[in-house]
Image (tube, grey):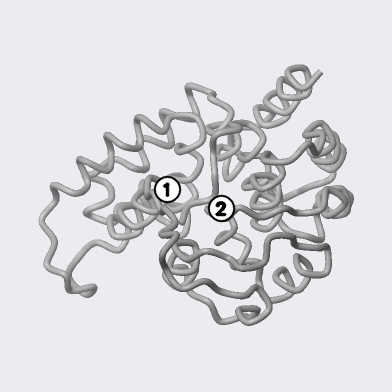
């Protein structure tokens, strides 16, 4: 049943390959879309900030889409990008290449927990100002709380949702009703948080078909594919996770 839903989601992602819809098509494995995405990520285009690479905000989106369907290609691209000489001066270095480098490194980064590090409490870190580096530091430290309720998750989402990323390395139980609740409100929850919740639900007995069914229900109603890209990525590839 899940395979059938996955195929339906792939077909929905392939319905258009123009504009930002190309991102979903790339993540779903459409070869023409992948070629266009790779063109925008070509090192020569990036280092010169050409019209093919621009706009800069699309560079990160292209890297993320490629990381879903072709992570091995992304690793090869990263090796090419890292060979480009850099001055370290943001006024002299290419903005597009910098974005591509940083995004790819986050996609391929591995963060592991240090059991001997100072433990932390969930409630003490519910703050809206956390940067990704702070989240990575928390992910390396053991979480004292072993069970998180819907209220705990909701409080984190109200602070932007970044704290959920720190749960990737933790041995923590999340009530399955949490996933059912947010699956029923995918659009209002947002793609970033939904993608994180989909990832966390993989470690539970929550029925993944619910995620597929809810996203397929709202797919025909969206006008901007960015409303669903990240959450769709998490379903198109069950090994894919939000970058650190």
Circle nearer the N terminus (1, 2): 1
Q: Say above or below: 144 vs 221.
A: below
Percent x, y of residue 224: 70, 51
Give the label, 1 or 2, closer to the camera.
2
Q: Residue at x 27, y 46 (%)?
A: 45
Helix or strand or loop: what does disc 2 sit on? helix
Q: Which residue is drawn at 63% across and 62% down?
A: 164
User: Disc 2 marks which residue?
Assistant: 168
Dot 2 alpha-carbon crowd within 10 angstroms: few under 14, some 14 to 19, many 20 or more: many
Percent x, y of residue 42: 28, 40
On screen, residue 165 versus residue 92, left or right, reads: right
Dot 1 alpha-carbon crowd within 10 angstroms: few under 14, some 14 to 19, many 20 or more: many
Percent x, y of residue 4: 77, 17
Q: Are marks 1 and 2 in contact (CB under 8 Å)?
A: no
Helix or strand or loop: what does disc 1 sit on? helix
* Nearer the observer, 80 or 31: 80
On screen, residue 53 versus residue 141, left or right, reads: left
Q: On residue 107, which mark appears?
A: 1
Q: Where, by quadrant of the figure, is residue 116 drawn?
A: bottom left
Q: How far apart are marks 1 and 2 (CA)?
A: 14 Å
Seen from this angle, which residue lies furthest front? 116
Q: Which residue is drawn at 68% across and 39% down?
A: 202
How many marks the image carries: the answer is 2
Q: Where, by quadrant of the figure, is residue 153 drawn?
A: bottom right
């Amino acid at each position: 049943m899940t395979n059938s839903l996955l195929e339906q989601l792939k077909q929905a992602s392939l319905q258009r390959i123009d504009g930002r819809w190309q991102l979903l098509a790339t993540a779903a494995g459409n070869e023409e879309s992948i070629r266009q995405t790779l063109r925008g990520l070509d090192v020569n285009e990036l280092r010169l900030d050409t019209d093919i690479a621009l706009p800069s905000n699309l560079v990160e989106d292209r890297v993320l889409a490629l990381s879903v369907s072709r992570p091995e290609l992304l690793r090869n691209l990263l090796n090419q990008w890292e060979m480009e000489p850099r001055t370290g001066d943001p006024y002299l270095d290419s903005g597009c290449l910098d974005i591509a480098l940083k995004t790819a490194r986050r996609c391929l980064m591995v963060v592991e927990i240090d059991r001997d590090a100072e433990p932390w409490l969930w409630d003490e870190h519910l703050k809206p100002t956390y940067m990704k580096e702070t989240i990575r530091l928390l992910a390396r430290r053991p979480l004292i709380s072993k069970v998180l309720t819907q209220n705990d998750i909701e409080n984190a989402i109200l602070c932007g949702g970044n704290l959920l990323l720190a749960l990737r390395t933790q041995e923590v139980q999340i009530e399955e009703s949490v996933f059912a609740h947010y699956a029923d409100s995918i659009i209002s929850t947002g793609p970033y948080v939904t993608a994180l919740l989909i990832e966390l639900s993989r470690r539970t007995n929550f029925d993944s078909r619910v995620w597929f069914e809810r996203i397929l229900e709202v797919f025909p109603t969206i006008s901007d594919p960015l409303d669903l890209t990240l959450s769709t990525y998490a379903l198109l590839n069950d090994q894919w996770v939000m970058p650190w």
